[in-house]
Amino acid sequence: MEKTSKIIIVVAAVFALLIAVLGFLYVEKQKEVILFYGETCPHCEIVEDFIKDNAIEQKVKIIQLEVFKDAENAAKMQKIAVKCKIDSANLGVPMAYTGRKCYIGDVDAIEMLKTKSGVSA
């Protein structure tokens, strides 16, 4: 009986590890990005131009949330920044969030979008 219990525990542990690895891979492959931007932000415009010029929205689902005029979106950005351990002094737009990581600034956001979309431009 004791040998059977050990086998069950080992099988359960392997199964749990497999589920965890598959979950991690699923999250990594998701192609949804939240892009926080400001209406008058020149760096945000650079990211927007990149998205349009490279048809990124055909490859990656992008949820764009304006934060200068929309307090609810600004609060969402603050909440996500806390998850990413970004202190408010370093917070700005554009900021992209993949569900796992935040990317601040046009250069980092564009590099992440290139990777997610497979674009080499």
Image (spheres, helix red, strand yellow):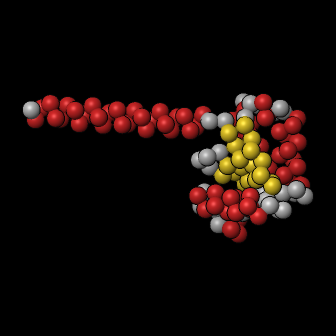
Where is the C terminus found, in terms of image quarters?
top right
Q: Residue at x 68, y 39 (%)?
A: 32
Left or right of 63? Residue 80 is left
Q: Position of residue 24 (x, y in %)?
A: 50, 38
The quarter of the picture where residue 73 lies is bottom right
Q: Position of residue 22 (x, y in %)?
A: 47, 33
Q: Position of residue 101 (x, y in %)?
A: 62, 49
Q: Residue at x 83, y 32 (%)?
A: 55
**Whether residue 101 is situated above or below residue 71 in the rendered picture:** above
Left or right of 95? Residue 8 is left
Q: Residue at x 60, y 57 (%)?
A: 84
Marks counted in the figure total 0
Left or right of 61? Residue 101 is left
The quarter of the picture where residue 4 lies is top left
The foreground one among 2 and 121 is: 2
Is residue 94 something one can see in this rendering?
no
Where is the N terminus found, in terms of image quarters?
top left
Is residue 80 something one can see in this rendering?
yes
Q: Residue at x 36, y 37 (%)?
A: 16
